[in-house]
Amino acid sequence: MKFCWGTIKVNDMEESLKFYKEIVGLKENRRFNAGPGVEIAFLGEGETQVELICDEKNKQVNIGPDISLGFKVNSVDEMMTFVKEKGIDIHSGPFQPNPHIKFFYVLDPNGLKIQFVEFI
């Protein structure tokens, strides 16, 4: 069995697409209407993708505080500088629980924790 995608319900498709494309660096693969007032977009390359769903009838997206998505970066320090320049606050970190990994979190436009990870 293979993991296909993680789905995130979003309040604003344009704002969320901008974050995942410009900040996380994901490529938009598909975007389509899935019924009245429902839009879906898939982002990412490789086997696993991120699916964004915006439903005009459900504008109160509630994402739990214990869920996060992790993305590999070349340098945590450079990524921290980049997100700060884009006006995004660091949610927490950086953390280095062992000599081989370093990471920090930001929040996406919907409150989902996004982890940027450097493998040392």
Image (spheres, rainbow, N blue to C red):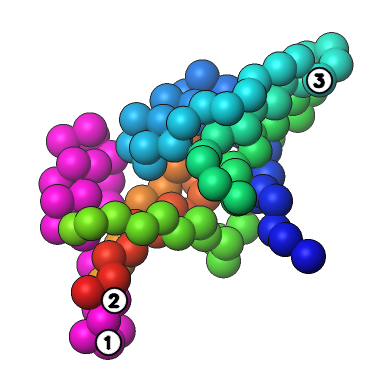
Is the Cβ of the residue at disc 2 closer than 8 Å to that at disc 3? no
Rendered image quadrant of residue 9? top right
Neighbourhood count class around disc 3 (C-alpha, 10 Å): few under 14, some 14–19, many 20 upward: few
Q: What is the secondary structure assignment of the residue under circle 3? A: loop
Q: Crowding near pointer 1: few (<14 within 10 Å), some, many (20+)?
A: few
Q: Mark 1: which amino acid?
A: Asn
- Distance CA(mark 1)–CA(mark 3): 44 Å
- Amino acid, disc 3: Ala
Q: Is residue 65 left or right of residue 20?
A: right
Residue 65 in the image, given as x and y percentages of width and height: 55, 61
Figure quadrant of residue 20: top left
How packed is label 2: few (under 14 Cα within 10 Å), some, or many (20 or more)?
few
Q: Please tell me the numbered disc located at residue 41.
A: none
Q: Residue furthest top?
A: 36
Instruction: Kindly report the distance in space between the C-alpha atoms of the residues bearing marks 2 and 3.
Output: 40 Å
Question: How many numbered markers are drawn?
Answer: 3
Q: Is residue 97 left or right of residue 61?
A: left
Give the residue at mark 3: 34
Q: Which residue: 14% across, 57% down?
A: 77
Give the quadrant of residue 97. bottom left
| Looking at the image, residue 42 lies above or below residue 79 | above
Q: Where does residue 85 sit, x and y in percent of width and height?
A: 16, 36
Residue 101 image label: 2
Q: Which residues are magenta?
A: 76-101
Q: Is residue 56 visible?
A: no
Task: Answer with mark 2 or mark 3, whichever residue precedes in sequence.
Answer: 3
Q: Are marks 2 and 1 in contact (CB under 8 Å)?
A: yes
Residue 98, labelled with which disc?
A: 1
Q: Quadrant of the N terminus?
A: bottom right
